[in-house]
Amino acid sequence: MKRLLGAAVVAVLAVSLVACSGKARVRQPAELVKVSNQFDLAPVWSLSIGSSEPFNFHPAVAGDAVYAASRRGSLRKIDLQSGKTVWDVTVPEKLSIGPGSDGKVTAVVTTEGDVFAYDDSGKNIWKFHIGGEVLTAPVVAGGVVVIRGLDNRFVGLDAATGKRRWIYQRQQSALSLRVGYGMLSIGDEVIVTGFAGGRFGMIGIANGGLVWETPISFPKGFSEIERLNDVSAKPSMEGERICAVSYQGRIGCAQARTGTLTWFKDFSSFTGTTQSTEFVFAANEKSHVTAFRSSDGVQVWENTQLTWRDVGEPLAIGRVVLMGDKQGYIHAMSQSGGEMLARVRHDTTPVTAAPIAVGGLILVQSQGGKLTAYSPK
């Protein structure tokens, strides 16, 4: 019944995004305003990994390598600087989410609920049947592979052997979003992640213990759909500040050590937050991008130029905020004022995963499977 309800919620949300009051024209994406690029994103290398549609696969970076996968089961290790494929293996089953890796062990999860782990030569070293559906990328850290299921179950597996070390079970909510609930790993010690019901928290990697848990918002309304209030996107961290946002709820920041909220504002998003030292950035369901002052949550600017373009997860880097959209464009906005500074067409398929900044490069993977390393110039 929960799975049927989850599917119903996704259908309702999809309809609400496609039309408003039955008028599809309201949902038409904004026409792109011409931009004179103030800097370039020059391609350094590009590969076709294979489609992940309709899912949102992220590449994983560890050391000087990139690990990327496709829904059909292709898993690659790629040299970060040259883009050359180091190894390419085929997982025996279709994948439900992209890989997690620490550079020694790389883990993927299949649609059958199986976890496959590979060593750094591409050899399969173990398989574990997790059971249930997994739409969240694994975290590999501290000798543990952390798997999060849609049933609110977290499982810690020994990275070397695949044996179960611990399990942490959250209480099931009446209704929740059927999406991947991102996990942010902090070193080899903890992960920070969101929960249903407007809460987020910190979990120990070694033992699965809950370190702290904080409500950022509370369900409201009469129907179960109105009361949907999940923190589904991966929280962001800058210094000692962790920020998160809930769907139909609030955006806010907390102290990393204690989880104590320092501020919150009414806001709704399922694509998450990104931060600079001064600001916190997020896009709402209409793809209106907003900057909040990180110290107290005061709104600094809002950009509505990308209305209904279904922008993806954002990345704050240097002086810009980067995010993709459903037509495969990458947009760069000024962190200080929100004006559009640059745009590049990455692909013709949606870019929903956050760009990754590493080694002087910006990595972007589309749902169609195009993975490109850009050099900002």
Image (tube, rainbow, N blue to C red):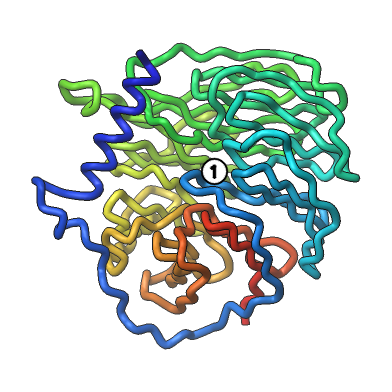
| Residue for point 73% across, 47% down | 75
Place of residue 156 in the rendered image (x, y in percent of width and height, measured from the top left): 71, 21
The amino acid on which the numbered mark 1 sits, given as a three-letter code, is Arg
Quarter of the figure that contains the N terminus: top left
| Residue for point 57% across, 36% down | 96
Q: Quadrant of residue 79?
A: bottom right
Quarter of the figure that contains the C terminus: bottom right
| Residue for point 59% across, 39% down | 97
The residue nearer to you, when weighing 264 against 176, is 176
The residue nearer to you, when weighing 105 against 48, is 48
Place of residue 28 in the rendered image (x, y in percent of width and height, measured from the top left): 22, 62
Q: Does residue 102 appear left or right of residue 230 in this picture?
A: right
User: What is the number of callouts on the image?
Assistant: 1
Q: Does residue 328 appear left or right of residue 192 in this picture?
A: left
The residue nearer to you, when weighing 257 against 89, is 89
Place of residue 285 in the rendered image (x, y in percent of width and height, measured from the top left): 30, 49
- Confirm whether residue 224 shows in the render: yes
Q: Is residue 227 above or below residue 87?
A: above
Q: Which residue is mark 1?
A: 241
Place of residue 68 in the rendered image (x, y in percent of width and height, measured from the top left): 69, 51
| Residue for point 45% across, 35% down | 179
- Confirm whether residue 277 shows in the render: no
Q: Does residue 118 appear left or right of residue 358 in this picture?
A: right
**Circle 1 Cα neighbour tier, 10 Å, few/some/many (<14 / 14–19 / ≥20):** some
Callout 1 secondary element: strand
Taking the view exactly as shown, the residue that stands out farthest to the right is 121
Q: Does residue 92 appear left or right of residue 233 in this picture?
A: right
